[in-house]
């Protein structure tokens, strides 16, 4: 099933505005299916064990329990290195994952290409968010909505070339849901016959 083998990573810091016009940091926890190349995005307010576990529980309740999680080695993380080490050392996380029979492994140290299947999608996610947000300040709730829409757009990217002969390409959303979750624009032939 989709997300049985899942890659896990965090994007860089995002900023949101509170009701008192104060700017706070938040992060995107990205889950990537190694088979369907689908993603699941969770917005987390901080990099604590509790925030990660809640994001993981939301992921599991929507996508299913993975049998294997894989993520960067703690030494290769820049912003979240201490967090991942703390999460793996946490008795709560070890207990939760062992009860659910989820195996969590890290990629080989100094071998970032092993995580290429999720690192590429981190880059795509950051690019989409950068284009959508520009330099605008949004609330946490608005950012969560934008993140859900970003997930839908990325999961509707075609695996194959789209032409007028092939208007229904295979996408991660099609593999997850049996249909696209966003309709793609139709191709029109504007050439006139002479």
Image (cartoon, grey):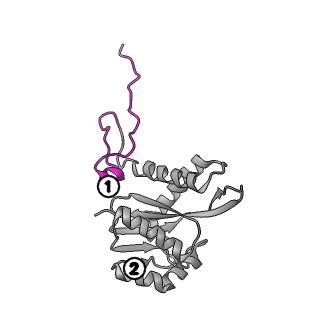
Asked if residue 186 is among those painted magenta in the image, a careful observer would answer yes
Task: Identify the residue at image location x=42%, y=73%.
Answer: 70
Q: Residue furthest right?
A: 21
Cα distance between the residues tagged 1 and 2:
24 Å
- Which element is circle 2 on? helix
Percent of width and height locating residue 37: 38, 58
Image: 137 above or below 59: above
Percent of width and height locating residue 24: 67, 62
Taking depth in this image into account, of 167 and 194 the one nearest to the observer is: 167
Task: Identify the residue at image location x=31%, y=62%.
Answer: 2
Residue 154 in view here: yes
The stretch in magenta equals 163-192
User: Magenta part mainly helix, strand or loop?
Assistant: loop
Task: Identify the residue at image location x=33%, y=80%.
Answer: 101
Percent of width and height locating residue 55: 47, 67
Residue 12 in view here: no
Q: Residues within 10 Å of mark 2 (few under 14, many from 20)?
A: some
Quadrant (top left/top right/bottom left/bottom right) for the N terminus: bottom left
- Which element is circle 1 on? helix
In the rendered structure, the answer to whether residue 120 lies left or right of residue 60 reads: right
Asked if residue 82 is among those painted magenta in the image, a careful observer would answer no
Tag 1 residue = 176
Taking depth in this image into account, of 99 and 20 the one nearest to the observer is: 20
What label sits on residue 97 in the rendered view? Answer: 2
């Amino acid at each position: 099933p989709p997300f049985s083998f899942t890659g896990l990573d965090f994007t860089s810091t995002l900023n949101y505005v509170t009701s008192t016009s104060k700017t706070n940091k938040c992060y995107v926890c990205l889950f990537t299916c190694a088979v369907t190349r689908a993603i699941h995005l969770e917005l987390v307010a901080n990099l604590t064990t509790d925030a990660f576990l809640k994001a993981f529980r939301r992921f599991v309740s929507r996508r299913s329990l993975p049998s294997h999680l894989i993520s960067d080695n703690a030494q290769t993380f820049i912003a979240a290195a201490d967090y991942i080490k703390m999460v793996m050392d946490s008795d709560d996380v070890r207990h939760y994952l062992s009860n659910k029979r989820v195996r969590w492994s890290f990629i080989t140290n100094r071998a970032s290409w092993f995580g290429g299947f999720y690192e590429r999608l981190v880059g795509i996610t950051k690019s989409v968010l950068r284009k959508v947000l520009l330099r605008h300040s949004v609330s946490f709730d608005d950012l969560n909505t934008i993140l859900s829409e970003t997930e839908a757009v990325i999961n509707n990217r075609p695996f194959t070339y789209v032409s007028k002969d092939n208007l229904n390409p295979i996408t991660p959303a099609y593999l997850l849901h049996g249909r696209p979750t966003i309709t793609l624009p139709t191709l029109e032939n504007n050439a006139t016959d002479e």
